[in-house]
Image: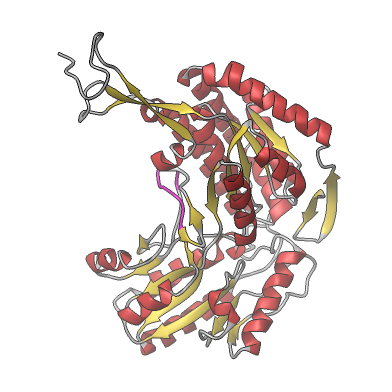
Amino acid sequence: MTYQTINPATGKLITTYAGISAQDLNVALDQAHSAFKAIWREYSIVERAKIVSTAADLLRKKSKEYADYLTLEVGKLAIEAQAEVSLSADILDYYARNASHYLKPRMLPESPGAELHLEPIGILLGITPWNFPYYQIARIAGPQLMAGNVLLLKHAENVPQSALAFARLFEEAGAPPGVYTNLFASIDQIGKIIADPRVRGVTLTGSERAGAAVAELAGRNLKKSVLEMGGSDPLIVLEDAPLETTLDSALFGRMFATGQCCVGTKRIIVVGKQRGKEFLDGFVQRMAALKAGDPQDPGTTLGPLSSEKSLDMLLNQIALAKQHGGKVATGGKRIDRPGFYLEPTVLTHIEQDNPIYTQELFGPVVSFYSVNNEEVAVNLANDTPFGLGGSIFTADVERGRKLAEKIESGMVFVNQPVWTAAELPFGGVKNSGYGRELSALGFGEFINHKLVHVAPSGSPPWGPVSLG
């Protein structure tokens, strides 16, 4: 597997990195195992927090440098790159501050003498995608390093400089060697890592195909896994939703990170035919007004796709949609300029027999539906193999809350597109995966919840006892 930086705004190759050798991989595994056994799990929570919070401070101090890597390798708009840097630092800080609370032993009052102790399990393997190179790592590293686990990190092959930069954070913050290790590993090597008995868990954000392969390997080797595999998030607009602010939110929900976001709005569902026409007109105008350009230019509102492969995939999906009766309300073509730019695209008339109906559109492309009533909107929203996030827009907040209960997903936001923060659990259902990241739920995914039961000396061999 080749790790290389290709600037998506120009299409030019910047640099290439060699993959890790079998010998160096064995050394990395040995070092991680030793770091866990002899050092990191023995550190106090305060000692771990000092290192993790220092990494967060370094990330903020070097925010321009770190944001520039994102723009260079992914084509992220400068303002969005800065936002990702800030969010990632906030996540690291959140776990540095809250780990002592999360790891505190808990009494089980229904059984006197019973205590629940939370302990690390060992080496974890993180497999992360290219679309949010720092955020995807932070939501693993923050909780799991604070829990006392150590991390091997395999990043996407098109963001090697971002991967190396994040690894430097922990080195500069004083983490012992082996606590956080970046690996330029191949797919075959990943299989060997998962099978290694010293590795106790694996977490992946990626495609369904990759998730299924990792889950199979993890299950065969009796390893815990957490998977986040994308989505086709619906955004439901009820009849009473204010038009202009909802249009603005829908544009943000679809076009943040040039639409390359697992919880991005992929399907807009408007209740009411007349409201649907008004909403489509307004959304098309907003999409068509986006300006392609250098992602470092503050005036640019449309960045490139991350790669030619991503661009070609979307062009093929648009062609497939048209072949099966879909129509293009705006966009649909590659922009004639250097780099991997696609016109912001709105698809309509996507029926159930259209292959695009069940596919994820990962980029500046959205499918649009106008339906007669709320019941049809909910059925359409749920008629997908995915179940990551969803949004509902309405002037009646209580109505939105009740409707959220009917959406089959891991997250539903009322009157906002789906967003993320350290304190909010993140994850989905159905083909979007299982397990949770962030918040207390993410902290507990790779922890040994050990029962310790204490009885007085001379107690009977079985059953509850009085502690006096």
For residue 17: magenta?
A: no
**Front position in the image: 305 or 372:** 372
Q: Residue furthest front?
A: 461
Residue in the picture at 66% in, 82% down: 320
Q: Is residue 330 above or below residue 195?
A: below
For residue 425: magenta?
A: yes
Residue in the picture at 66% in, 26% down: 32
Q: Position of residue 174 (x, y in %)?
A: 63, 21
Q: Main secondary structure of the magenta part?
A: loop
Q: How is the image coloured?
A: secondary structure
Q: Which residues fall within the magenta stretch?
A: 421-428
Residue in the picture at 56% in, 41% down: 222
Q: Is residue 426 above or below residue 368?
A: above
Q: Position of residue 30 (x, y in %)?
A: 71, 25
Residue in the picture at 61% in, 89% down: 324
**Front position in the image: 85 or 111:** 111
**Front position in the image: 133 or 351:** 351
Q: Residue 342: in sight, yes or no?
A: no
Q: Is residue 47 above or below residue 346?
A: above
Task: Please tell me in which quadrant of the rendered image residue 360 appears.
Answer: bottom right
Q: Residue 466: in sight, yes or no?
A: yes
Q: Position of residue 408 (x, y in %)?
A: 39, 65
Task: Please tell me in which quadrant of the rendered image residue 183 appears.
Answer: top right
Counting every numbered tag in the picture gives: 0
- Is 343 situated left or right of 278 in this image? right
- Is 22 situated left or right of 91 in this image? right
Q: Position of residue 273 (x, y in %)?
A: 38, 89
Q: Residue furthest left?
A: 468
